[in-house]
Image: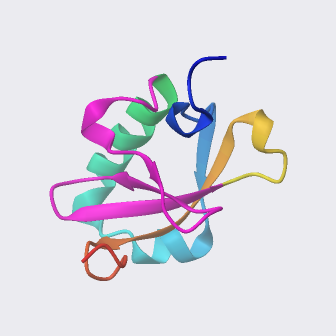
Amino acid sequence: SFINSAFIFPKVTSVFESKKFIKKLNPSLSGRWEKTKAILIKNPSSNGLNFKPWDLPEWSVKVSKGERAHLVPSQDSSSGIWEAIKIGDHKFMGHG
């Protein structure tokens, strides 16, 4: 009750990719994306992920040094199921 809810990471039990995401996923980045998903499911608060709210309901996660992915929770946000909807470099994703 003393922790601000802004500091509580949402549950992530699984992540699936939208068709649009799959089309944008560069084959050279697919291995890194799979590793990112595995870490996200294991521990969404992992420092290396920089998992953060972006333009709610979207959340952003670091995939590589210059690439990020955006995800949205399923309609039942308590289920921990997320859909990856966008992937790209920082500029494309609106991060600068």
Residue at 32 percent of width and 41 percent of height: 49
Q: Nearer the viewer, residue 93 or 35?
A: 93
Colouring scheme applied when the structure was drawn: rainbow
Relative to 13, residue 91 above or below: below
Residue at 56 percent of width and 23 percent of height: 3
Q: Is residue 64 magenta-colored?
A: yes
* Viewport quadrant of the C terminus: bottom left
Q: Position of residue 64 (x, y in %)?
A: 21, 54
The reply, left or right, for residue 78 in relation to residue 57 is right
Q: Which residues are magenta?
A: 43-72
Relative to 50, residue 19 above or below: below
Q: Position of residue 5 (x, y in %)?
A: 61, 34
Judged from this view, the residue extending furthest toward the front is 2
Q: Quadrant of residue 10?
A: top right
Q: Position of residue 77 (x, y in %)?
A: 77, 44
* Viewport quadrant of the N terminus: top right
Residue at 44 percent of width and 49 percent of height: 52
